[in-house]
Image: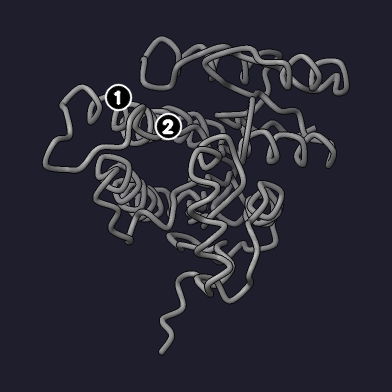
Amino acid sequence: MQTAIITGSASGIGNAAACLFLAKGWRVVGADRRERETIVQMKQQFANFIHVQADISDEDGRRHILKAAEAGKNVVKALVNAAGVAPKNRCDILEMTEESYDFVMNINTKGTFFLTQLVANHMIQNAGSADEANGAIVNISSLSAYTSSTSRGEYCISKAGVSMITKLFADRLAEFNITVNEIRPGIIATNMTKPVTNKYDAQIKSGLLPLARWGRPEDVAKAVYALTDGSFPYTTGQSIDVDGGFHIRRL
């Protein structure tokens, strides 16, 4: 049974990814800052699900996650960095506070970087030959990595950072045949986007997206899984848009 670490597993994209991996027979170590009802349900449904309550912005939290994954001499074959936060309050960049900036960056960018570093070293230590797949890392970024949103600049900056994290680790880990890719979700129906439902409903109705509907967490989870199950063995450092065509420039 292969082991995957999936952060942000209690809700949204992380939860959808964790459920898909579990359904495919993986052992999943799901990390989240809180134990929510969804976590309780997953524990009841899947014997191969291990929940770790941890904050990826904290070094001890990250080490706790990997320790749980390694238990029983298991080797991590996939890391899905899905944990992420939005600003607690949307605010014009001319009024953004350092507290808000640090809160978002510490989880979205710093946490993603150093958990990736930790798990990458684990994968290297347990790697076989360079001819076989020795692991896959998938970072969940956002269309905000390249789209300006001046009411949540710290989020945009954090996700642009995730894009560079992807490229850096893809370059560094290629010699070990460990792939690192990024998925940029579009407008996905999660708790994070719930407060702006009316705004996006109107924009989708007016033609913002070629595929004129909200994305679902499961849409992203399917792309995540494809990047870890061996379907893309010769793909690394790639950004894949799962956004209903938002990235298409149209006249």
Closer to the camera, 21 or 208? Answer: 208
For mark 2, give the secondary structure. Answer: loop
The location of residue 124, given as percent across then percent down, is: 48, 36
Tags 1 and 2 touching, CB below 8 Å: yes
Q: Which residue is mark 2?
A: 85
- Asked if residue 234 is positioned above or below residue 44 in the image, the reply reads below
Instruction: Say which residue label 1 marks.
Output: 103
Q: State the image quarter where residue 232 is shown.
A: bottom right
Is residue 101 shown above or below 245?
A: above
Q: Amino acid at mark 1?
A: Phe
- The residue lying toward the viewer, choosing from 178 and 28, is 28
Residue at 53% x, 75% y is 207
User: Whole-Å distance between the Cαs marked 1 and 2?
Assistant: 8 Å
* Whole-percent x, y for residue 75 in the image: 64, 28
> Does residue 17 appear left or right of residue 234 in this picture?
right
Q: Amino acid at mark 2?
A: Val
Q: Which residue occupies the extreme left position in the image? A: 94
